[in-house]
Amino acid sequence: MTLQDVLSEYGQDFLDSHKLSPHARKVFSAILHCRTAVLGAHRCVCDNCGHEIFMNNSCRDRHCTLCQTAAKELWIANQSQYLLNTNYFHAVFTVPDALNPVILQNQEKVYPIFFKAVSETILELCRDRKFLGATPGITAILHTWGQNILYHPHIHCVIVGGGLNKTGKWVESSKKFFLPVRVMSKLFRGKFLNYLCKLDLCFSGSVEALNFKTNFTSFISGLYNTDWVTYCKPPFGSPAKVIDYLGRYTHRVAISNHRIISMEDGFVTFSWRDYSDSNKVKLMRVTAVEFIRRFFLHVLPPGLRKIRHYGILAARNKKSRLALCKKLTNTPKHLSIRDLSLSDILARIFGCDFNLCPVCRLGHLNKASPASVTA
């Protein structure tokens, strides 16, 4: 059972009762037609026996549940060369649920300030000598869903447990996390709300949205008096654990196919983890139209980068800065992604040869020219 199956069976019912933006419509169409004849096919030829096969094209949309494996593994292989021989920590920044309707209607404006407030909070506190006195590296990943697929925007951060100080020396953090959660929460809250008040926000549609517009000042004041949930998880055991974590979080979509249990009589049943009940795995049954509605709450604005790097991992002068950090932390040399093909990467991870010819079992299937044909 896949998301594509649900869209194929009940997608038109959803479109008849819900309005999607032009971008979301493209995502809908891409997922619906992924690996079908609608998107055409490409011809692969064995370099040993000449056997030919035609394979349907993937949509490669970042929201598609069928298209993330290759992109994820390539990204992880590339990022693994930037790992350092040091501790790594995991922090999660969330906003109060009362903000969800505001963010949902202003995603293109609010997501950037979300990243900005998170990164500035971590970097500012880490540069303080009371905590670290250096600039660490941060990989920030935006997620917009909870286990029940409802809207719940939050940012996961993988933070290097150390950094470069002003004199170019490496400063190692303690094995316990070096930033107090309460201080981090208050600073993040202040930065986020300060940036939010400077935005030209849009409110339309529901009575609830119009109430935000007319009572926005008092609404913001109430948020200043609310405790914001920012928490830190236990440190990773090793850099290898960081890669395992990144693999599970970076290219994840709102729901993966293995969580969709059944689809019948207009209802979809999926598994979810109830964090409020000892992380028990439970089943949830909703109408197919509601299931699709929940999924499309998480379609990101076009061009928005959901994974961002800061501090010593920022793009500017990254190569020379990381070379210095590796030297100072005695990090062994890592094989570059440029030395590996996608087939090599997938074969190393899953232990099998993905493009081995099914006929001769000696040669490999490679794209022929022309690369694609029309269905």
Image (cartoon, rainbow, N blue to C red):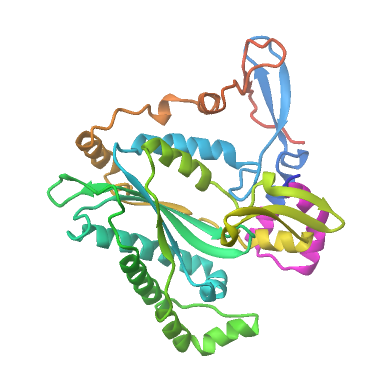
**Relative to 214, is 90 above or below?**
above
Which region shows up in magenta?
3-28
What is the x, y in percent for residue 355?
A: 62, 22
Front one among 250 and 187: 187
Residue drawn at x 67%, y 19% is 45
Residue drawn at x 66%, y 11% is 361
Front one among 235 and 144: 235
> What secondary structure prevails in the magenta region?
helix
**Relative to 120, is 215 above or below?**
below
What is the x, y in percent for residue 186?
A: 34, 72
**Relative to 276, is 339 above or below?**
above
Q: Is residue 254 visible?
A: no
**Position of residue 135 in the picture relative to residue 22 (left or right):** left
**Position of residue 56 in the picture relative to residue 124 (left or right):** right
Residue 21: in magenta span: yes
Asked where in the image residue 131 lies, by quadrant, the reply is bottom left
Front one among 7 and 256: 256
Residue drawn at x 28%, y 39% is 319
What is the x, y in percent for residue 279?
A: 58, 54
